[in-house]
Image: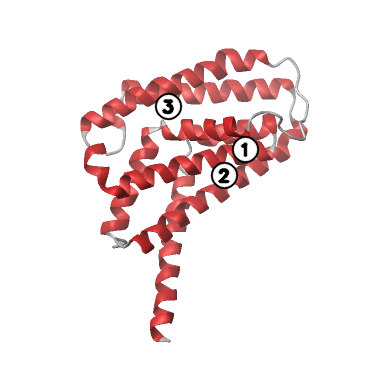
């Protein structure tokens, strides 16, 4: 009985540490935040959720890669620079698309009750934008380091519970963002959607410029 109580207390501690780390990650506002908001406003709640699903898959991939022992390779200066240049270039392309193309395509806007496009495309957008941000990669490298050294989560079971708690926390907060943005759709006009696309484009380009021109500013 004592061992069972001890296990439950330990598990709760691992989960709580994961939730706290997940909340910290949600406050790191970046391109993903604006992408979820913009997608939910333009296409509805479920579309924003599928973007969030892609983000979760991307996060899970980075956790797996980091935990499998590739941290030493990924934490080298050359890798950080290459990742910054590559990710920055792709994000710059997304930014230019939303700023110059997407914002001009819209001639009218109506509230859609269901998105008729590809759900895979939405999840893929979330996956790509999140995966190409080196800041996300280095957050997970740091988090894996903290989990294995400070918290001592070296066993597979504890590590799984910890990182699953983080991913679930991030996903739930992204769903909340999508829901709140969807509620605002009743107030949306074509001009507001155009402004949202312009803002998203500028944000993506700003992050891309920082990655391309100031790669050393990425957290170690």
- Is 74 situated above or below 191? below
What residue sits 61% from the left and 46% below the top? 175
- Read off the residue under disc 1: 48
- Is 120 situated above or below 176? above
Name the image quarter holding the N terminus.
bottom left
Callout 3: 10 Å neighbours few (<14), some, many (20+)?
Answer: some
Q: Residue 62: horizontal and vertical position, in percent?
A: 38, 42
Q: For mark 3, give the secondary structure.
A: helix
- Read off the residue under disc 3: 207
Foreground mark, 2 or 3? Answer: 2
Rounded to the nearest angstrom, the CA distance separating label 2 from label 1 is 8 Å
Count all numbered tags in the image, as a single digit: 3
Residue 162 picture quarter? bottom left
Foreground mark, 1 or 3? Answer: 1
Can you tell which mark lies on residue 169?
A: none
Residue 160 picture quarter? bottom left
């Amino acid at each position: 009985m004592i061992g069972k109580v001890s296990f439950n207390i330990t598990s709760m501690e691992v989960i709580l540490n994961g939730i706290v780390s997940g909340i910290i990650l949600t406050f790191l506002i970046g391109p993903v935040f604006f992408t979820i908001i913009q997608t939910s406003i333009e296409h509805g709640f479920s579309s924003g959720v599928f973007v969030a699903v892609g983000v979760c898959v991307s996060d899970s991939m980075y956790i797996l890669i980091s935990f499998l022992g590739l941290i030493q390779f990924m934490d080298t200066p050359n890798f950080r620079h290459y990742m910054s240049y590559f990710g920055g270039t792709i994000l710059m392309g997304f930014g230019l698309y939303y700023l110059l193309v997407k914002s001009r395509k819209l001639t009218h806007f109506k509230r859609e009750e269901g998105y008729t496009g590809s759900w895979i495309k939405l999840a893929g957008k979330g996956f790509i934008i999140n995966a190409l941000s080196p800041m996300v990669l280095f957050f997970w490298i740091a988090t894996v380091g903290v989990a294995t050294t400070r918290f001592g989560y070296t066993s597979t079971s504890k590590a799984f519970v910890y990182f699953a708690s983080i991913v679930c926390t991030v996903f739930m907060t992204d769903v909340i963002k999508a829901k709140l943005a969807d509620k605002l759709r009743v107030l949306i006009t074509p001009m507001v959607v155009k402004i949202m696309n312009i803002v998203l484009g500028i944000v993506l380009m700003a992050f891309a410029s920082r990655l391309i021109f100031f790669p050393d500013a990425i957290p170690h």
